[in-house]
Amino acid sequence: MSLTVSEQIIAILAREAVLDPHEVRPEMTIEDLGLDSLGLVETIFAIEETFDISVPFNANDPAQGDFDISSVGAIVAAVERLIAARGAALA
């Protein structure tokens, strides 16, 4: 049984935040997870590697750019859009 995109992202976030995946909820923010800037960058790298996508993320100014990191749910939705865009580009 393969994991959904959401489950994989939650697993990545939980690993970086040193939490159990069951503790990670869609409404949680990066701050709620206790991730610092380095943890966020590590998370972005792990997402890119896991899904073979390029995340438009500016580590110097995370609020800028087209990648919404306002919550776990927003990150999942943004990754799903990037995966869909990659698939459309390959078609």
Image (tube, grey):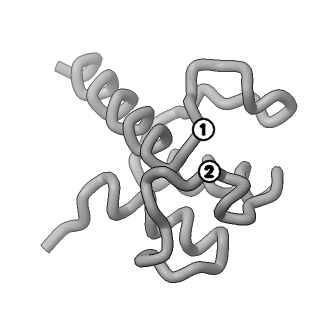
Q: Is mark 1 on a helix, strand or loop?
A: loop
Residue 37 in the image, given as x and y percentages of width and height: 82, 51
Identity of the residue furthest to the left in this view? 1
In this view, the residue in front, 25 or 61, is: 25
- Classify the position of the N terminus by image quarter: bottom left
Identity of the residue furthest to the right in this view? 60
- Determine crowd level at label 1: few under 14, some 14-19, many 20+ residues with C-alpha closer than 10 A: some
- Relative to residue 28, is residue 56 depicted above or below? above
Mark-to-mark CA distance, 2 and 1: 6 Å
Residue 76 in the image, given as x and y percentages of width and height: 41, 44
- Determine crowd level at label 2: few under 14, some 14-19, many 20+ residues with C-alpha closer than 10 A: some
Residue 25 in the image, given as x and y percentages of width and height: 45, 62
Q: Do the residues labelled 2 and 1 touch (CB within 8 Å)?
A: yes
Q: What element carries label 2?
A: loop
- Relative to residue 33, is residue 63 depicted above or below? above
For the point 60% across and 38% down, the residue is 69
In this view, the residue in front, 62 or 89, is: 62
* Residue holding disc 2: 29
The disc placed on residue 14 is: none
The image quadrant that residue 73 belongs to is top left
What's the residue type where badge 1 is placed?
Ser
* Residue holding disc 1: 70
- In the displayed structure, does residue 86 sit left or right of residue 40? left
For the point 62% across and 50% down, the residue is 29
- In the displayed structure, does residue 39 sit left or right of residue 78? right
- Relative to residue 56, is residue 24 depicted above or below? below
